[in-house]
Amino acid sequence: MHFIYKATTHDGRTIAGEVDAANKQALLELLHRQGIKPVLITAGNAKKKNGLFAPKKKVKLGDLVVFTRQLSTMISAGVPLARCLNALQDNAENPYLREVLASITKDVSSGLPLATAFEKFPNVFSDVYVNMVRAGEEGGILDEILKRLATQVEQDASIRKKIKSAMMYPMVILTITIIAFFGIMLFVIPKIGKILLDLGGPKAKLPIYTVVLLKISGFCVSNSIIKHIPGLGAIPIVSLIPNILFILLILGVIGLRVLKYIKTDAGKYRFHDLLLRIPIVKVIISKIAIARFSRTFASLMGSGVSVLDALDVTGAALGNKVIEAELREAAKEVKNGKPLSEPISRSKHFPAIVAQMLVVGEETGQIDTVLTKIADFYEEEVSVLIDGLSAIIEPIMIVGLGAAVGLIAASVMGPIANLSKNIGG
């Protein structure tokens, strides 16, 4: 929901603003965390375009990196914050980012802290981002914090780009394979089956793999929206369309219910737990989570954030509810006076080297430095692992496609050759 509010700050100033929140209670909690006392809250209409072809409200990680680095440089040069934001707003290429920066500039000019202004746009600035900016403002080192944030966002963007790149080739090949398979089953194999029956008659003995191929083709034809008729090609079978639409509707409803369940806390936990049980996926997710934990926690500790607050923010930034739950349990032990390395050493998902390095960091007082090295190491591990999988997947898929083509060719050409010999004899 979209709300318009008037409120007073801790120093007695009156401010006004607009913000999206799940409900009025969520908005009250948000304003309370910001140290703002609401005076008037009304539900309003968000000023945005609706419709199927409306532009998506999104800021790419690359745009966020550029904005963060530019803001850090301008602050380091002594440019006033409101002027920095105004200049970056004018130069932003992303329309939504310009819209966001216009609102942030207005809030900062009215006296709100930068972190508070960022917090109104959770789809652009994550909890980690907001908390690090808040720590930078309180410690007077905002420019240094923004440099760290830019590095962190760049690393996240790099990992995501590698994963997308690694998945692109298999997905394209798989899609083409599926389309080609059904094309062959629906249009090619029925004609070849007719040729085989014409050559050998209804009692012709065919190899088992040829029989299986013809059965699969027959099943695909009889259960598709088209039916092959010799001499006429493929024509639509109107009577089958309602059945297929009904099946698609059922699958769509099931899919929507599954997606809705996965969005709940319990659903996310079970889904993330399932991912951590799949061998190769488990390794990738664990390494990414460790790298993200190490870099985020190091950045927060280096910014002067307390260990408990850093654990709370870091857990929410990992993207995996199972590992987040482990960190919450670790935070409870830290609150009771134990060092962080102790609960981490008993973790199912953090390797022993992380706990050992934490011990070194705790003893030397350089946890942020040690964890940054761990982050660099695991980010490199993720990069190598993804590159290795990409290199393996390509030949495997080529071999698989070659085997499928060879099987289809053998299933078709072998019987035709044998039947031709019998006729010739």
Image (spheres, helix red, strand yellow):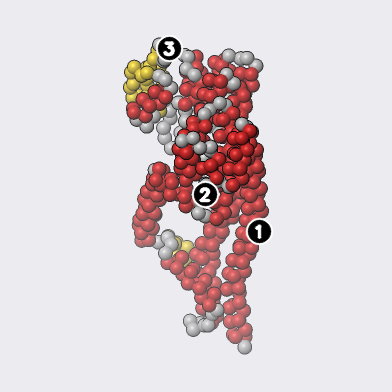
Q: CA distance from mark 3 to mark 2?
A: 48 Å
Q: CA distance from mark 1 to mark 3?
A: 66 Å
* 102 is higher (above) or lower (below) than 333: above
Residue that sits furthest to the top in the current view = 12
Q: Is residue 364 visible?
A: yes
Residue on which the image places disc 1? 395
Q: Nearer the viewer, mark 2 or mark 1?
A: 2
- Looking at the rendered structure, the kind of residue marked 1 is Pro
* 375 is higher (above) or lower (below) than 78: below
Q: Quadrant of residue 366?
A: top right
Q: Quadrant of the C terminus?
A: bottom right
Which disc number belongs to residue 348? 2
Residue on which the image places disc 3? 11
Mark 2 or 1 closer to N-term?
2
Q: Nearer the viewer, mark 1 or mark 3?
A: 3
Which residue corresponds to the image point at 52% horizontal and 32% vertical from the top-left? 307
- Looking at the rendered structure, the kind of residue marked 3 is Asp
Mark 1 or 3 closer to N-term?
3
Which residue corresponds to the image point at 61% horizontal and 59% vertical from the top-left? 397
Closer to the camera, 400 or 423?
400
Q: Quadrant of the N terminus?
A: top left
- Looking at the rendered structure, the kind of residue marked 2 is Lys
